[in-house]
Image: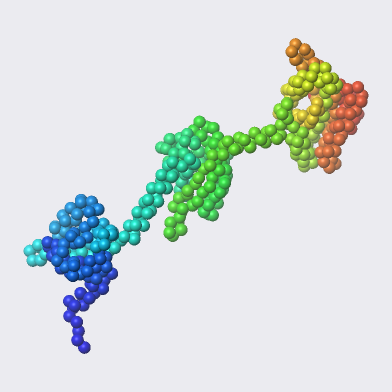
Amino acid sequence: MTQLPLQAILIQALDAAANAIVITDAEPRILWANTAFSTLTGYPLDESIGCKPAELVKSGLQDPQVYQQMWKTILNGEVWRGELINKRKDGGHYDEEITITPVCAVGDKVSHYIAVKHDISARKNAERKLRESEAKFRLFYEHAPVAYQSLDITGRIIEVNPAWLKQLGYQREAVIGRFINDFLAPGQDALLQQRFSEFLSIGSTSKVEYDLLHCDRSIVSVSVDGLVERDNQGAFKKTHCVLHNISTHKRMEKKLRHLAATDALTGLANRRQFLEQMILALARHLRHGTPTALLMLDLDWFKQVNDNHGHAAGDAVLKHYAKVIQSSLRNIDLLGRLGGEEFGILLPDTDSIGAYEFAERIRHVAAAQPARLQAKEIAVTFSIGVATFMRHDPSTDVILARADQALYRAKANGRNRVEVEPPLARPLGAAR
């Protein structure tokens, strides 16, 4: 069996290589190239031999300084590695990673160059698309109307966009590198710790609400949606979060809740809110046995006020006496308008005797402070029914019925008086 000479074997190996290989003389003109070179450039070998590589593939798109550095290196007999943008025979462009090795003859003078070329067009295209995508994202990030933030795994702020800074009133240098906890409203640290741990574990979060501190110390309410970015091995890189400002929505919700619970004329708790608080008070009473009392007040002969002075005057009288009564209450007491000229007072930590004494005091205070309307005084008295919560009360309806019965008895017995249900054993003074 005839063996091929080593040189022939080497030539076959080089020709079969996946990377393009070119051998030139010192001028440099192409002396030999492999099949991969033809595949990469589109030039057949018979058209390549004897040509300078620049005559075939130079695109004109490369920074001239790259060539200057390349020639400086290889003329010194050193290996040069770099990336070039070259041109195919059909005019299309490609990116290559190239290594040029000078071959020195006797006397250390360069006689040949060996260039190994690797097509990196796919990688460079991917990099360009990534840069374009990142540029578009950065443009969107910087000009988005909503706030964005990125945190590291400890909750330290890596990045925020201008909308975030505008929303909270800070300068960028006062934010980057600080923990997000520094910008939370008081009392939310534990909530953030729990939610952030869940966020990192699950990898996403949606519509979680926080109160942040504006630089002027006002509250900015936000709803947060976020994702965790991980690398190819699944390791944490950073978070990406969108912060929607819901402060206006929160204020509107608060206003609506207030309107739903407030009597429009007097500003007191309305019937619905008053009855809801009674239910809570009964639950506390049944659980802890704390004494609690209910007063029902009705303005005597109020229809005559409307008939004689008009409904506008009647409304003014109701507002006046609402303020008079409110000024005599403790912080824990609740005054509500139950309807028309009827009011209710919820008195926590008050037994029947204390409630009776307080009702008498209210009756005298109201009588001593008539409403003054356009130089006229309109004096109105109160009939008051008192009931206390009992251990066997199944619902607030029973308590309301007792207070209403006491109020009915106060009116039947001449008005401008206080009655208790069940009745007290003996009358008491008016001091609370």
Residue at screen point 71% across, 31% down:
262
Image quadrant where one finds the N terminus: bottom left
Number of marks in picture: 0
As rendered, which of 223 and 294 lies closer to the eye? 223
Above or below, 91 relative to 184: below
Residue at screen point 11% across, 64% down:
111
Q: Position of residue 236 (x, y in %)?
A: 46, 54
Residue 58 as seen in the image, left or right of residue 174: left
Residue 49 as seen in the image, left or right of residue 82: left
Note whether residue 125 is visible.
yes
Q: From this viewpoint, which residue is outermost toward the left? A: 107
Q: From this viewpoint, which residue is outermost toward the front? A: 90
Residue at screen point 49% across, 46% down:
241
Residue at screen point 35% across, 55% down:
127
Above or below, 175 relative to 320: below
Note whether residue 23 is visible.
no
Above or below, 56 relative to 289: below
Q: From this viewpoint, which residue is outermost toward the bottom? A: 1
Q: Position of residue 155 (x, y in %)?
A: 48, 46
Snapshot colouring? rainbow
Q: Position of residue 427 (x, y in %)?
A: 89, 24
Q: Position of residue 224 (x, y in %)?
A: 54, 45
As rendered, which of 13 and 313 lies closer to the eye? 313
Image quadrant where one finds the C terminus: top right
